[in-house]
Amino acid sequence: MSEELQRALESIKGHHMNAEERDAQRVSFVYGNASSKDNGTKEAVVRALDLAEVA
């Protein structure tokens, strides 16, 4: 492991994601795992997740 990577990992040790960070991570995960044939946008993912939370 490079020294730079080791320093980066040490700097985030104990970090707990806040709600905003979790939401951004969730959008990124869904968008990144969507089919490339989908042609969806991140904004569409945000709308879909918002609708899913309401339901």
Image: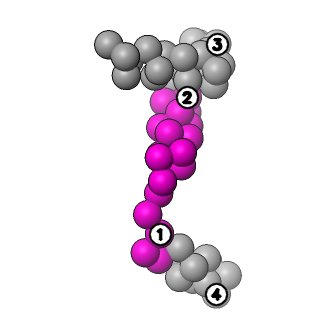
Q: CA distance from mark 2 to mark 4?
A: 32 Å
Tell which of 40 and 12 is nearer to you. 12
Q: Give yes or no for residue 20 being in the magenta stretch.
A: yes
Residue 16 x, y percent position in the rendering: 43, 63
Q: Is residue 3 above or below residue 25?
A: below
Q: CA distance from mark 3 to mark 1?
A: 34 Å
Q: N-terminal of the two: label 2 or label 1?
A: 1
Q: N-terminal of the two: label 2 or label 3?
A: 2
Q: N-terminal of the two: label 4 or label 1?
A: 4
Q: N-terminal of the two: label 2 or label 4?
A: 4
Q: Quadrant of the N terminus?
A: bottom right
Q: Is label 4 in a helix, a strand or a loop?
A: helix
Q: Is label 1 in a helix, a strand or a loop?
A: loop
Look at label 1 and name its amino acid: His
Return the mark for residue 31.
2
Q: N-terminal of the two: label 3 or label 1?
A: 1
Closer to us: mark 3 or mark 1?
1
Q: CA distance from mark 2 to mark 1?
A: 24 Å
Closer to us: mark 2 or mark 1?
1
Residue 12 x, y percent position in the rendering: 53, 73
Residue shown at 47%/57% (left/top)?
17
**Callout 4–callout 3 Cβ contact below 8 Å:** no
Q: Is residue 14 above or below residue 28?
A: below
Tell which of 2 and 9 is nearer to you. 9
Magenta stretch: give its range. 13-32
Return the mark for residue 39.
3
Q: CA distance from mark 4 to mark 3?
A: 39 Å
Q: Residues within 10 Å of mark 4 (few under 14, many from 20)?
A: few
Return the mark for residue 15.
1
Q: N-terminal of the two: label 4 or label 3?
A: 4
Residue shown at 43%/75% (left/top)?
14
